[in-house]
Amino acid sequence: MYFAALLARTEDGWEASDMELDDVESLSDLIDLARAAAVDDDTVVALIEQEDAWFGVVRVDGEEDPRYFVSNASAAARSSYGSMLTDELLGSDEEEDELDVLDLDGTEDGEEESIAAFADADDEDADHEAGPGGAERVPAGPLGDPRLLDDLGVSHKQLMTLDGDALSEIADSLGATEVLEAVR
């Protein structure tokens, strides 16, 4: 079971709205929802929680690049909405994968590549631990920018240690408890 809400900062405090996850098929859909909830391009914080398994925070400030934090990346990666965040944070880049398939080594068709070129590629691959199927291993703890709420009253140390009812604790630190509970 998921819970998701948007907290939009206004001159008078925070406004909360329930985020309908059925409309979110990609991370860019989530970012679009957050930007649409913004008041005068001010800060919007999207909060997502899957029971007590993990929580995620997405911060959007106007047209700046969004910032992300996930409390337990390995648990989040096993869920549809959490995997969108972990994929973004781990830099899963489909374009890069497509380039690996292309012949960009400068050889002409039919020419054999040197063993040295393969050795260099193997050294680079050894720097990244791989999980089953060659996929990059997802860490079992927090992932992302733990400082994304520092200026709003939630320190990075606090964010890194939250568990259980984390979204309520974040809302309390932001001064948005009542508005969050109204949409819960």
Image (cartoon, rainbow, N blue to C red):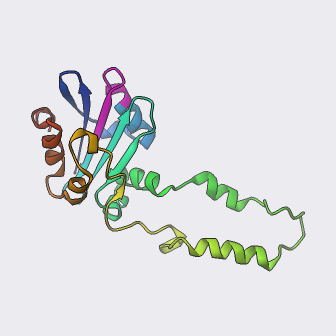
Q: Position of residue 151 (x, y in %)?
A: 27, 40
Q: Is residue 52 shown left or right of residue 67?
A: left
Out of 144 and 56, give the one closest to the viewer.
144
**Bounds of the magenta span?**
35-47
Q: Say which residue appears at 32% left-offset and 49% top-offset.
A: 147
Q: Would you say residue 139 sits in the magenta stretch?
A: no
Q: Relative to 62, is 172 above or below?
A: below
Out of 20 and 125, give the one closest to the viewer.
125
Q: Position of residue 34 (x, y in %)?
A: 35, 32
Q: Say which residue appears at 18% left-offset and 27% top-offset.
A: 13
Which quadrant is the C terminus positioned in?
Answer: top left
Q: Say which residue appears at 18% left-offset and 22% top-offset.
A: 12
Q: Would you say residue 38 sits in the magenta stretch?
A: yes
Q: Can you tell which quarter of the image residue 78 is in? A: bottom left
Out of 96 and 62, give the one closest to the viewer.
62
Residue at the extreme front of the image, as rendered: 151
Q: Relative to 41, is 177 above or below?
A: below
Q: Is residue 157 visible?
A: yes
